[in-house]
Amino acid sequence: MASHLPYDHRKLGRELDLFDTDPLIGAGLPYWLPAGAAIRHALEEYVRELERKAGYQHVYSPVLGKRELYEISGHWEHYRDGMYPPMTVGPAADGRGSRGEDAAGQVVLRPSLCPHHAVMYRSRAHSYRELPLRMAELGGMYRAELSGVLGGLTRARSIQLNDAHIFCAADQVRDEAAAALKMIRQAYWSLGIEPARCRLSLAGPSAKYVGSQQLWDQAAAVLRDVLQGAGVAYEEEAGEAAFYGPKIDVQVADSAEREASLSTVQVDFYQPERFGLEYVGPDGGRHRPVMVHRSVVGSLERAVAHLIDVHGGSFPPWIAPVQLVVLPVSDAQRPQAEVLVDAAIEQGLRAEMPADGSLGARIRAHRLVPYQAVIGAAEAKVGEVSIRLRDGRKLPPVRIAEALSQIIRHVASHSPELWPAAP
Ligand SMILES: [Zn+2]
């Protein structure tokens, strides 16, 4: 299914003023311009709402953590190459101010959110009645990628991850992993994207994989079952697992047919053990929860890069940086046009009215905007508007309030289509 995609996100990202980088900020540290930030914001809101409806609770945690946190999680031992060097903050415990020697006081930029969430789970007592406890965060993490491989949004050193950890009983893992996979498929529909393939990533011969073989086999069997239950075609691949457990990876390909994992569902028996996580079971005894790690759209950087690769600038209406452009035919219709823009913004749409230029030039300049409202003398007189769609279709003129509510209804459906099909 992997196809050669028509667009290159690095080139288009600059042309469409979505994001950029500057050597003074640093390689691999992209910044988001207003149009790119609008896309990212729409995506963040969408995922947060999807998660809220699925019973996730959102949290925030700091992007720094003590080195010891990652020693306990196993990242320090098994993932250190991908991490930034630790920083020593303030004088060391010996009072002599030596830097870099007091490991206990060192902090690192986090390479993942899991350890923070494990500690947050541990900070409160939990009963089996609270499980599955679904903790979600859209948070920053940092990877010390080599400068030679950095580029655009896909190889970045600063990453915003749509992440969540589900703490659950062993017999709940299957349903939680299946629900996460379903959520991923729903999001892909809304985003108008398709995976290149699904991969069941298993341990390889390397020594980096931790924990007992029996638990790895058990976790892999659950994920296999989930994939088969969902009727998803997949390939098994040894050596692609996380160091703490096997995972389902939803792979996407970029315009150069390089493949990368966007979404993931992982089963982890290891970190709950390392952090001593517990819940009180129906028997009154203490039990160990399992951690399901999952990401619906992956990092915002990679997700938006892929959206650009797939759609060019013609994004699904709910993600488009500008959703409605209002075009008065002449200056006489400007007052009505302003009323429409204000009403659209007030009702939650990203709308604008371009300054000067001929009508044709203004239409061309906004050809990627899904909806164009042209207001001429005839429309202004009767308080109506005719909406042109980005693909050239023209809807019949309707009252301004009706046009707005039609657009808002369609945008709120998170459909990848430009307009609902005629009934
Ligand atoms: Zn995790």
Image (cartoon, rainbow, N blue to C red):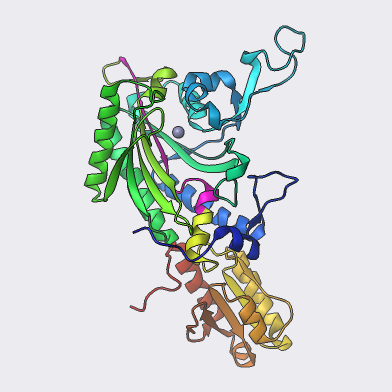
Q: Quadrant of residue 205?
A: top left
Identity of the residue drawn at 60% across and 93% down: 378
- Residue 216 point in image, percent of width and height: 30, 27
The front one of 282 and 23 is 23
- Residue 249 point in image, percent of width and height: 37, 43
- Magenta residue check for 291: yes
Identity of the residue drawn at 60% across and 21% down: 66
- Residue 63 point in image, percent of width and height: 60, 33
Relative vertical location of residue 61 with respect to residue 103 in this rendering, above or below = below
Identity of the residue drawn at 40% across and 73% down: 420
Q: Which residues are magenta?
A: 285-303
Q: Is residue 252 left or right of residue 80?
A: left
| Image quadrant occupied by the N terminus | bottom left
The front one of 391 and 172 is 391
Relative vertical location of residue 242 with respect to residue 226 in this rendering, above or below = above
Single out the residue that lies furthest toward the front. Answer: 148
- Magenta residue check for 404: no
Single out the residue that lies furthest toward the bottom. Answer: 378
